[in-house]
Amino acid sequence: MPFISAVVITLNEEKNIARCIGSLSEVADEIIVIDSFSTDRTAEICKAFNVKFIQNRFEGYIQQKTFAVSQTNYPVVLSLDADEALSGELQESILQVKGNWKYDGYYSNRINNYCGTWIKYTSWYPDRKLRLWDKNKGRWEGMNPHDRIVLSKGSSTGMLAGNIEHYSFDSVADHIRQVNNFTTIAARSYYDNGIRAGYMNIILNPLWKFFREMVLKRGLLQGYYGLVISSVLSFETFLKYVKLMQLWRNRQS
């Protein structure tokens, strides 16, 4: 039976962190919180639980999550964001594989709570994530702010029952604020990697994104919030490429 190290990164997550840690405490043998010097009650709440609380300067999502893994004592790592929690079914599924570990990593579906509504359509569900893995077989990769676990070649994977419950946004305004922040980070990551944007990216990519979310991913069936999410995701695509083009234009001026 492998021991599990659960890791969470935080910054001003006082409204979410207790729910997250509470769900992890049912399955993890240690919980490690890496905090980016929160100014709210995050530290106080974490210290009320039996967790290892470490503050570390934030240099990027991939870097912070990689640092979190480096602080673990056990070979199997379970990673959640602070605004996520394990469903009861997922807790049971993790306990089952903990007693019968077969694969190098395990995927689970993530379901998003948007303005109080569980979203069951668009690309937001099933939003498959690999969050439980042998740390000797995988590492965090990707381009900030979009990180993912990449397992080494030849690694095996399984699927867990249940959902990661993601309490994403309380309002559309919160969503748009995050889009503005994340597209700035994404555009900078693209720029640093030499990726350029053209007018066709700005025009066609957002249109394709909207069609994909509303039609191919059945956002229509989600009603009003399906339309809102599809529209904001389309705008996110537009904004990312506009900001990327502006970075290159600023360089040339």
Image: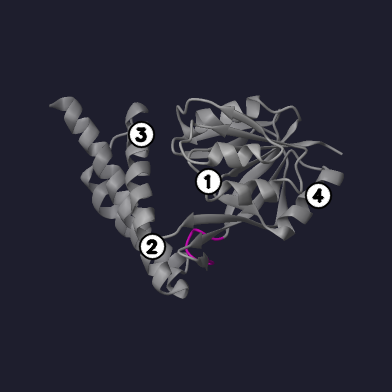
| Spatial CA span between label 2 and label 3 | 23 Å
Q: Is residue 152 visible?
A: no
Tell me if residue 207 is in the magenta stretch: no
Question: Which is more foreground, mark 2 or mark 1?
Answer: 1
Secondary structure under tag 3 reads: helix
Residue 82, picture quadrant: top right
Q: What is the magenta range?
A: 119-125
Label 1, on which residue?
14
Mark found first going from the N terminus, 1 or 3? 1
* Circles 2 and 4: CB atoms closer than 8 Å: no
| Spatial CA span between label 2 and label 4 | 36 Å
Q: Image quadrant for the C terminus?
A: top left
Which percent across, then down, holds residue 27? 76, 46
Mark found first going from the N terminus, 2 or 3? 3
Secondary structure under tag 1 reads: loop
Residue sitting at 75 percent across and 30 percent down? 75
Label 3, on which residue?
190
Amino acid type shown at disc 1: Glu
